[in-house]
Image: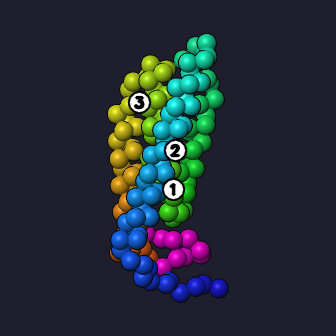
Amino acid sequence: MERAHQPDDRDPARGDAARRVRFLSAAVTASALSALVLITAAGTDADLGAPRYWPWVLTGLQVLGLWSAGSGRWWGWLLGATVQLPWIACAVVTGQLGFIPGCAFSAVVQAHSFAAGQSPSRRQPKRDGVQVYA
């Protein structure tokens, strides 16, 4: 059974505050993950310069972010943007500096997509329980 779309009648200031809290939470998470990358890289003698599991973990988080954004989940773009700072940290410790511009660009695009998707004017009725954006 399909539910009717309920308009977002929240106070716009409250929505902006929630968006700021989500961005702040993402920044703290990105910083913590980046610190973990750097700390674990300092204690390894791996040829790559960082433990081999980091590219797998970060790729998994990136794919999850893209999948969830494509599925219309509000947190998908934010997760994708959050993962970029740890990717930059991994690029620095492994000497793969060519990743940095792409990660920075990706972070900006995904953060913008998150912010734009949180705008009440872009929300559409839910389809099959998933929020769809215009």
Residue denoted by label 1 = 76
- Give the magenta-colored segment's residue range: 125-134
132 lies left or right of 97: right
Q: Quadrant of the C terminus?
A: bottom left
* CA–CA distance in space, label 1 to label 2: 14 Å
Q: What amino acid is at disc 3?
A: Phe
Q: Position of residue 95 (x, y in %)?
A: 44, 19
Label 1 vs 2, first from the N-terminus: 2
Residue denoted by label 3 = 99
Residue 13, quarter of the rendered image: bottom left
The structure's colour scheme is rainbow
Q: What amino acid is at disc 2?
A: Thr
Residue denoted by label 2 = 29
Label 2 vs 3, first from the N-terminus: 2
91 lies left or right of 102: right
Disc 1 on helix, strand or loop? helix
* CA–CA distance in space, label 1 to label 3: 21 Å
Dots 1, 3 in contact, CB < 8 A: no
